[in-house]
Amino acid sequence: MPNERVLDILRNKHRTYSDEVLNIMNEQHIDTTDIDTLLIYGDIDFSKSKTRQEPCRYYWLEGFVEDKKTSLYIENCDTIVTIKEIHITK
């Protein structure tokens, strides 16, 4: 299944966060454990992702953190994954 394969790749690389994402996580009381959970149970929206982009691919991940719909925009490069954006809907 493509969703599980991509999530496995994203979980197993070194992860960084943009400053904007860190600020929102702090304001919303979201920690890296919540992000880990999204990377296990979330769903990749391939229609919003750029899976053929070079040199890094971009994925849109959707799921829930504490009953809040949460979306991540993730940059997947060779050795590192960067959480570029986070969107939370109450």
Image (tube, grey):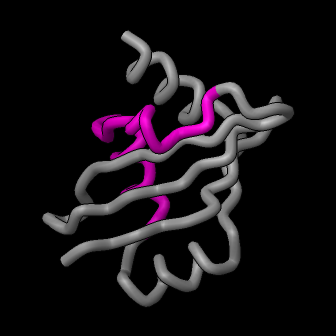
- At 42% from the left and 45% from the top, the residue drawn is 61
User: Residue lying furthest bottom in this view?
Assistant: 27
Q: Position of residue 33 (x, y in %)?
A: 41, 56
Q: Residue furthest right?
A: 55
Report the front residue among 6 and 50: 50
Q: Quadrant of residue 57?
A: top right
Q: Residue at x 48, y 60 (%)?
A: 32
4 relative position to 32: left or right: left
Identify which residue, 8 or 72, lies in the foreground: 72
Q: Which residues are magenta?
A: 31-51
Q: Which one is in front, 25 or 45?
A: 45
Q: Is residue 4 above or below residue 46?
A: above
Q: Position of residue 15 (x, y in %)?
A: 67, 49
Residue 38 drawn in magenta: yes
Residue at 33% of width from left, 49% of height from top?
A: 62
Query: Is 60 placed left or right of 34 in the picture?
Result: right
The answer to whether residue 79 shows anywhere in this view is no
Q: Residue furthest left?
A: 67
For residue 59, what is the image quadrant?
A: top right
In the visual, does 33 lie left or right of 22? left
The answer to whether one can see residue 5 in this image is: yes
64 and 46: which is toward the camera:
46
Q: Looking at the rendering, which quadrant does residue 45 occupy?
A: top left
Assign the C terminus to one quadrant of the image.
Answer: bottom left
What residue appears at the point 70 percent right and 57 percent down from the top-left corner?
16
Q: Is residue 29 magenta?
A: no
Residue 44 percent across, percent down from the top left:
40, 36
Q: Quadrant of the N terminus?
A: top left
User: Where in the figure is residue 80, as x and y percent of width and height?
Assistant: 77, 41
Q: How many marks?
A: 0
